[in-house]
Structure formats: structure tokens, C-alpha cells
Image (tube, grey):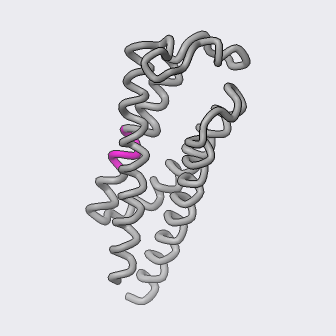
Amino acid sequence: MKKLKMLFIILGGIQFFVALGALPVGYLFITHPDGSTVGMNVEMLANSPFSDFLIPGIALFVFNGIFHLINAVFCFFKLKIAPYIGVISGIGLLIWILVQVYSIGLSSYLQPLFFSIGIVELILSLFLIKMQSNDRDLT
């Protein structure tokens, strides 16, 4: 049981970390769609369907920011739904990075870092689901 609680806290910490990076950058993309405030420019989007960073900024802010932050709180309160949302947010983070690399290329060490974090988030969430299922079987 202690292991289960610790894994919830670790997953919540990972999700809080993702949100901590996504919220300010997403906000900056929304308020400055040319990407200038984060050292990017719209020319980077030449091979993507976007003309500026507004739509990617909204997606980053909402899905990798707010969504991860809410589920981090769910994890800290050890809500049973948190690992299921963790699976969705982990897959979402992986898709986000894959689309980003496809659209603008591999341009930062943060891309493989956050891809790895997405894998860890997904595996940890699936492990928590399994542990909760086993816990239910014991009661």
C-alpha cells in the first residue's frame, strides 16, 4: 500500500514538472504567436500546417499544461482515476513530441527528454492501474 501511494506521488511530480514547462511556454506562444519570446520563429513552421505558434500554443497550454496540472492534483490526492488520465496524458505527450519533431525537426535536447518523460509517465500509469487492480482483487 505504501508503494502505491509513493507511485502516485512520483506520477504527480512528473505531471507537475510537465505542466510547469508547458504552461509558461504555451502562454508565451498564445500571447506572442511569432515565437520570439521563446527564441523561435515562424520560419520553423514551414513544413507544418501552422503559420504561427498560436494553435500549437493553445494545445501546449491546455493539454500538456492544464491537463497535466489537474491530473497531478488527482495523483497527490490518490484518486483512482488518476492513472487512467495518466495514460492519456502520457500518450498525448508522446504524440506532441512526435508531431513537433516531424513539423520542426529535432531542434532541442528537450524533445528527447520530454519524449522519455512521456514514456515513463505512460509506464508508471499502467503500472498503477495494474497495482490498483491487484489491490481490488485482494479485498
Instruction: Specify the farthest residue to the left.
Output: 77
Q: Determine the residue positioned at 48% across, 82% down.
A: 134
Q: Is 27 in front, or is 123?
A: 27
Q: Is 12 in front, or is 88?
A: 12
Horizontal and vertical percent for residue 67? 40, 42
Q: Is residue 64 left or right of residue 5?
A: right
Q: Which residues are magenta?
A: 66-70
What type of secondary structure mainly makes up the magenta span?
helix
Q: Is residue 132 left or right of residue 118?
A: left
Q: Is residue 88 left or right of residue 23?
A: right
Horizontal and vertical percent for residue 59? 49, 29
Q: Is residue 107 left or right of residue 129?
A: right
Q: Is 57 in front, or is 75?
A: 57
Q: Is residue 69 part of the magenta span, yes or no? A: yes
Q: Determine the residue positioned at 36% across, 42% down.
A: 20
Q: Determine the residue positioned at 37% across, 88% down.
A: 139
Badge count: 0
Q: Is residue 16 part of the magenta span, yes or no? A: no
